[in-house]
Image (cartoon, grey):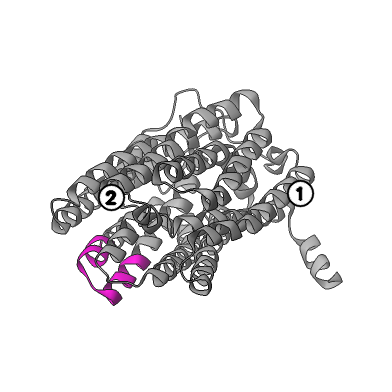
Amino acid sequence: MSSLRARVSRLSPSLRFVLLVGVMSFFADFTYEGSRSVIGQYLGRLGAGALAISVVTGLGEFLGYGLRLVSGQMADRTELHWPIAIGGYLLQMTVVPLLAVTGTWPVAAVLIVLERVGKATRNPPRDAMLSHAAKEMGYGWGFGVHEALDQFGAMFGPLAVALVLAITGGQYQLAFAALAVPAGVTLAVLLVARKLYPRPRDLEAVSGSVSTGGLPRAFWIYLAGAALVAAGFADFPLIAYHFERSRLVATDLIPIFYAVAMAVSGTGSLICGRAFDRVGLRILVPLTAVTAAFAPLVFLGGFWTGLVGAALWGLGMGVHESVIPAAVAPMVSADRRASAFGLFTGIYGISWFLGSVAIGALFYVSLGAVVAFCVSAELAALPLMVLAAGALGGAREKPA
């Protein structure tokens, strides 16, 4: 134990903060991703159809990203980054276990949406605080390390849920109730982080230059490309609903598929974060092209191709969860980052919602139509990613 303390003490304060927030995110994702691995089939069992599931999850993502516009600006204006983040975590970690006492799909839908609202509230101020620490080690690596811990929590959560379902014979309520344990750990680690690092901004020795000319051109081009990617990115609950409805994957194995996706996501965030620090946004071009293959694999394939498709879906999640904040952070000054994160992810979420509604409606037309829409939207983003990489100059250009 003393040896471990000595090793931790030798780490820089910035890295210790990133790791502490990463541990907090591990347990947070353990909680809510554990629930999200089964809410598609859970809503289906409660009587919801494909369109209802797609709209509920899409609305959740819409609010989960759209409300970041508000929380980001509020954090920058009030400088109450910690209180706003704590409020969001408290809401999110409370509503997930409450799914254990729902009996109808509309009630479950409200809790699912509120969970996304909690995430929307806490993410921009948390990412802004992380950016202060990440500057020292490289934005890509800092956010990549955090995202890796985040996504490995998202791997173990679904595995735990799958285990509970296997032991209890498919009792979803017990699985949701069990998630109260990691939820409590999340809140405990959150309070420790708040006590140890009351002013994360002090970790950034040299603040970014203040922008007087607005956000750079690369920001808007990158945002347009990311919006197309989001529109074509099907929600996993709809993928899970398809797996169960078509009987391609046994119910108790669907969380395993999600866990595989999250494992790939966590590993991918580390690799892609480091690659971003070295080559910039250009890394997104081949990765977006490759991950677009998730749609035909999960919707048109069989068991094993569906598993590969789920892994590619997870890679796409890891890429955009790690590279997005890493790319946005150096574009704006420190006092505007929460707003920039909120704006970027807000538009991203609106696109995700509109795309989810379209995908849900096309589900009733044909699976081929779903695949065509997803792949077309993803590939349409490639030229914009190329333009953004050129305009940003390898993610090193500062705003004018």
Tag of residue 192 = 1
Is 365 in the magenta?
no
Residue 252: % across, % down: 42, 71
* Number of callouts: 2
Mark 1 and mark 2 lie on one chain; the one further toward the N terminus is 2
Judging depth in this view, the residue of 139 and 321 nearest the camera is: 321
Q: In the rendered view, does 109 fall on the left or right side of 355?
A: right
Q: Label 2, secondary structure: give it.
A: loop
* Circle 2 residues within 10 Å: few <14, some 14–19, many ≥20: some
C-alpha span from label 1 to label 2: 42 Å
Residue contact at pointers 1 and 2, CB within 8 angstroms:
no
Q: Nearer the viewer, residue 167 or 35?
A: 167
In this view, 41 is above or below 48:
below
Percent x, y for residue 42?
Answer: 40, 56
Give the answer, above or below, for where 244 lies relative to 331.
Answer: below
Within 10 angstroms of label 1, few (less than 14), some, or many (20 or more) residues? Answer: some
Q: Quadrant of the N terminus?
A: bottom right
- Amino acid at the residue labelled 1: Val
Secondary structure mainly formed by the magenta segment: helix
Q: Is any atom of residue 141 visible in this view? A: no
Provide the residue span drawn in magenta. Answer: 293-311
Residue at the (52%, 70%) spot, across then down: 168
Numbered disc in front, either 1 or 2: 2
The three-letter amino acid code for the residue at tag 2 is Gly
The residue identified by callout 2 is 49
Q: In the rendered image of this protein, does residue 210 appear above or below residue 268? A: above
Q: In which quarter of the image is residue 279?
A: bottom left
Residue at left 46%, top 64%? Answer: 262
